[in-house]
Amino acid sequence: MKRETEWTQYEPAPGDAHAPSATPLYQTATFRIDDGREYDYTRSGNPTRRVVEDQLARIEGGSSAFAFSSGMAAITAACALVSAGEEILACVDLYGGTYRLLSQVATRQAVRVRYVDTSDPAALAHAFNPAPKLVLVETPSNPFQNVTDLFRLCDLAQAAGSLVAVDNSLMSPYLQRPLSCGADLVIHSATKFLNGHSDVTAGVIVTNDRDVAEHIGFYQNATGTALAPFEAWLLARGMKTLPLRLDKQQTNAGLLARYLRSHPLVERVHYVGLPEHPGREVHERQARGAGAVIAFETGALARSLEIVQSLQLFGITVSFGGVRSTASLPARMSHASIPDEVRTDRHFPDDLVRLSVGIEHVDDLRDDLGRAFDALGDSTRGLTTARAVGSHDVPN
Ligand SMILES: *Cc1c(COP(=O)(O)O)cnc(C)c1O
C-alpha cells in the first residue's frame, strides 16, 4: 500500500454496530462494567483514543502506540524508562522544552544526562563508552537541522544494550520512520504536523518492543497523562490529510529555502533540502523529504526582529507544522528555556529566524518575505553584529 493510502484507509470504528464513516467521539469518563467489555475508565482506555493509537502504530510501522496530552508528556514517559543512577544520552541540538525537562526534572530524579553531537560521526563512535540506558535524538534537529545517522546510531546502541528514542516531530511518519532504521521508540509532538491545524496539544510514543510498550502503557495509566477523547478525535481528523498538507508545505518550503539562500540580506539558511546541507546524504538514506521548517540567519538580532515583525502572512508564533505559515525567533521563544550561557556555548545565534511553511500560495509567501526585507530600515540594514534588544523579549 502506498503511504498516501494508509492515512485514510483504516477502520474508523471497529465493532460499531452502525458502521460510521468517521470515528465517533466517545466523550465519556466511564463505561458500564460488564463481563467481556474492553473499556472501564477513560484514563486507562477509550475507544476514540484507541483508533488514533492504532492508526499511529500502523503509519509508524510499530506494534503499539500511546497518545498523550502533549509532546512533553510523551517525552516524560520515555524518560521514565530510565531509573535513578542510569544515564540518558541526548543530542546537543534539542527542543528547548526537552532540554528543560532533562536538565531540571530528570536530573532531580537522579538520572544523569550527557549531551553529544550525534550528528558528528566521530563523537557518535565514542558516545557509548559508557553505555547509556536511553539515547534521545532529533534528526533533523530543531532548529539547526543537524542530521544523525539513524542506522549507525541504532547499530551502536544495540551493541551497547541501549534503547534509542527518536523525536520525529519535525518529519512526521509520512517522511521518516525511525523504527525501520532500528529505533526502539518514536516520539512525536502531535501538536505539530500530525494534527496540523494548531487546535490540539498532543504527544505520541510508538514502539515495537513488548517490554517498552508494557512500561509506557503502565506509566500512562499510572500518571494519568493520556490524551483526552475530544483531543484524540480532533487528532484523528487532522491526521487524515497529513500527506496532502505536507506535500504542499514541503514544496513551498523548498522554493522559499532557495529564495532565502539567494537573498543578499540572508547570511545562512538551515534546511536539509538544500544540496549543500552537510547532512543531506545521510538524511536521504533514512527519510524521503526535507519537511517544511526552515531556519535562517541575518547576522543581527535587530534585523531579524524587524523582519519577523513586518511579516504579514507568517504570524509570529511558537510551534510549527500547521497549515498557516508562522515565523519565530527560537532564541527568544521555543528555545528560551535553554540558559543564555548554554546557548552561547553551543553557538546558538540570537538572530536565527525559524519559519514553518504552510499551505498558502508560495508566491504570496515569497512576496511577504520580500516585502519584509525591503522594509528594513537603514539602521538595521547595515548592522553586522548581533545585539540584544531586551525590550522585545517574548516569554516562553
Ligand atoms: C513542540 C515539540 C515538543 C513538545 O511538544 P508539546 O506538544 O508542545 O508538548 C517536543 N519535541 C519537539 C521536537 C517539538 O517541536
Image (cartoon, rainbow, N blue to C red):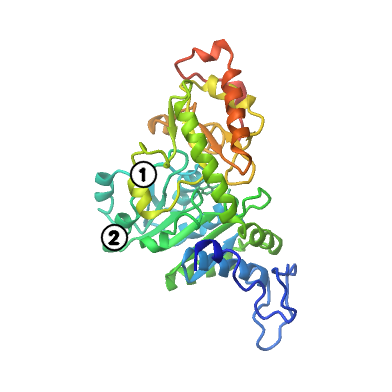
Which picture quadrant has residue 316?
top right
Which picture quadrant has residue 359?
top right
- Residue 252: image x %, image y %? 55, 41
Report which residue position mark 2 lands on: 155
Identify the residue shown where x is 58% and y is 28%: 369
What amino acid is at disc 1? Arg
Number of residues whose C-alpha sits closer than 10 Å to that of mark 2, classed few (under 14), some (14–19) or many (20 or more)? some
Q: Is residue 83 visible?
A: no
Instruction: Give the foreground label among 2 and 1.
Output: 1
- Gap between marks 2 and 1 measured at Cα: 20 Å
Identify the residue shown where x is 64% and y is 81%: 38
The vertical placement of 296 against 230, above or below, is above
The vertical placement of 225 against 377, above or below, is below
- In-front residue for pair 12/99: 12
What amino acid is at disc 2? Asp
- SS for dot 2: helix
Check the image and name the residue furthest to the bottom. 35
- Please indicate whether residue 128 sits to the left or right of residue 165 in the image: left
Q: Of the two numbered discs 2 and 1 on the same chain, state the one appearing first in sequence.
A: 2
- Residue 237: image x %, image y %? 67, 60
- Residue 317: image x %, image y %? 63, 37
- In-front residue for pair 299/67: 299
Number of residues whose C-alpha sits closer than 10 Å to that of mark 1, classed few (under 14), some (14–19) or many (20 or more)? many
Report which residue position mark 1 lands on: 280
